[in-house]
């Protein structure tokens, strides 16, 4: 009890020394937010090379505020980057784990990175520290991986809620959920996050509850996207414009809009529900709505590829515009557009690609078929360079609001 009381005082006085393990799109903004509030923050990464790169202000994150914060915080004495070793974490009071938790090619959870962190933590004296897992996991994984590392320490799960590219919902403006291995752990985390969050913290009763909250919020999104994707297929056959349908349905207070498209990408929405399914399977519970929704979303690439096949004639020029998983981000992880390109190749349909954000490829003038894979903001200025009066447009993100070219075939809408 004494140690927790002492740590609480150090948090309140901002003397607690914080280590953020993993400085990607989750860890780096979090580290900078604590540093800006005056905490002593050490960013911890796997390799010396990565530490040196970040120490020079180099990051693949394109958010301009993160990039400028990194530059300014590095200049101060209270933020620096180091390699994750038992030595570099020895003097730290709080360790926040923000490493990737992907799925493998068989859609099985891959928590290798988490286990590697646990191995390092196990080699130090954890007495009196607070360990927080922000990485997305299925219920029970935080306890299993970080619950028995030796020593007397506090343990919390607080799933990350970063929305890459979202200028409004940043690490300091979101509400965070925290769940502790015991009540004191949860209260310590509430005090800690309270130092940087403007919109409050929800303390839930256990690690597992916090883990399942993240599973629910992202699975909810995946299932609702799958539902509107199914409606889009129906609209395409009955001549209803799916966007008109959604706009009208939005007038109902209990309808939360989601939008159809070429597919669901990123490291969250198409990934987290597979952690849930694996957990449910271990409890001998089937979740057919979740499983079918994931399949429905994955099959949208075939739906859009069929639209290309329906207008393609040998020798036609095709441009696929945008490769990333969503607009205005430079992330291609789980991008449906990459799978869409594989399907075109499998169908023997040649094409070129262009993405202004990655960047990749070039605009080569007017084409016969123009495919919207990702509706980056640059598309507004770019499309007139590629779409002529005879161009067939396959609009994988329902970007166009009026007909362009010869015909627009969207996802649940056709403008001819
Ligand atoms: N998508 C659709 N239709 C939609 C919404 C999204 O097809 O109506 C597609 C996007 O194009 C993308 C994928 O789904 O390929 C994921 O889109 P997203 O907006 O959910 O973006 P993410 O993956 O960056 O989701 C993040 C997530 N944040 C965390 O997991 C911490 C997610 O929980 C948030 O709900 C989401 O941001 C958000 O709300 O914007």
Image (tube, rainbow, N blue to C red):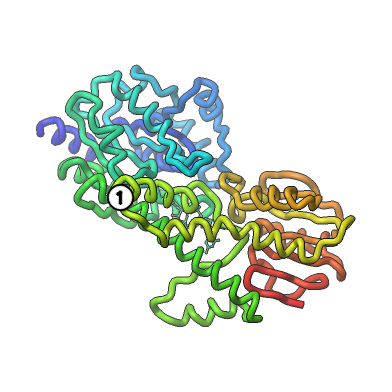
Closer to the camera in the image, 75 or 83: 83
Q: Is residue 200 left or right of residue 385?
A: left
Q: Is residue 69 above or below residue 126?
A: below
SS label for mark 1 = loop
Q: How many marks?
A: 1
Q: Is residue 245 left or right of residue 170?
A: right
User: Can the viewer see residue 395 in this picture?
Assistant: yes
Residue 297 locus on image (x, y percent): 54, 59
Residue 272 locus on image (x, y percent): 43, 49
Q: Is residue 231 left or right of residue 377?
A: left
Q: Give the quarter of the image for residue 17.
A: top left
User: Can the viewer see residue 366 in this picture?
Assistant: no
Q: Is residue 44 above or below residue 68?
A: above
Disc 1 target residue: 284
Residue at image point 59% right, 80% down: 244
Residue at image point 44% right, 33% down: 22
């Amino acid at each position: 009890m004494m140690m927790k009381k002492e740590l609480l005082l150090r948090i309140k006085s901002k003397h607690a020394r914080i280590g953020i393990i993993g400085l990607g799109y989750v860890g780096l903004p979090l580290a900078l937010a604590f540093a800006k509030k005056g905490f002593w923050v050490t960013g911890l990464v796997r390799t010396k090379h990565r530490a040196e790169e970040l120490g020079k202000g180099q990051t693949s994150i394109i958010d301009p505020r993160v990039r400028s914060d990194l530059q300014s915080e590095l200049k101060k004495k209270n933020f620096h980057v180091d390699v994750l070793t038992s030595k570099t974490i020895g003097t730290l009071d709080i360790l926040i784990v923000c490493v990737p938790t992907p799925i493998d090619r068989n859609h099985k959870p891959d928590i290798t990175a988490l286990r590697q962190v646990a191995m390092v933590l196990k080699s130090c004296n954890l007495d009196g520290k607070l360990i927080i897992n922000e990485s997305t996991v299925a219920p029970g994984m935080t306890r299993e991986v970080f619950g028995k590392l030796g020593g007397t320490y506090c343990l919390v799960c607080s799933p990350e809620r970063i929305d890459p590219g979202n200028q409004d919902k940043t690490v300091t403006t979101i509400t965070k959920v925290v769940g502790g291995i015991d009540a004191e752990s949860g209260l310590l985390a509430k005090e800690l996050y309270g130092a940087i969050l403007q919109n409050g913290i929800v303390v839930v009763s256990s690690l597992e509850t916090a883990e399942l909250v993240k599973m629910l919020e992202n699975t909810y999104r995946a299932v609702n996207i799958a539902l509107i994707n199914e409606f889009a297929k129906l609209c395409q056959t009955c001549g209803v414009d799916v966007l008109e349908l959604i706009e009208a349905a939005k007038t109902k207070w209990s309808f939360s809009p989601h939008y159809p498209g070429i597919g669901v990408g990123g490291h969250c929405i198409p990934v987290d529900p597979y952690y849930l399914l694996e957990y449910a399977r271990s409890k001998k519970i089937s979740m057919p709505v979740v499983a079918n929704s994931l399949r429905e979303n994955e099959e949208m690439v075939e739906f859009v590829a069929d639209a290309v096949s329906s207008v393609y004639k040998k020798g036609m020029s095709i441009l696929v515009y945008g490769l990333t998983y969503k607009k205005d981000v430079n992330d291609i992880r789980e991008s449906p557009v990459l799978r869409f390109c594989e399907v075109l190749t499998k169908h023997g349909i040649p094409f070129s690609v262009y993405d202004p954000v990655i960047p990749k490829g070039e605009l080569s003038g007017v084409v016969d078929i123009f495919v919207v894979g990702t509706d980056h903001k640059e598309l507004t200025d770019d499309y007139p360079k590629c779409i002529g009066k005879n161009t067939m447009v396959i609009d994988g993100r329902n970007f166009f609001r009026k007909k362009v070219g010869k015909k627009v075939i969207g996802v649940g809408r056709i403008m001819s």
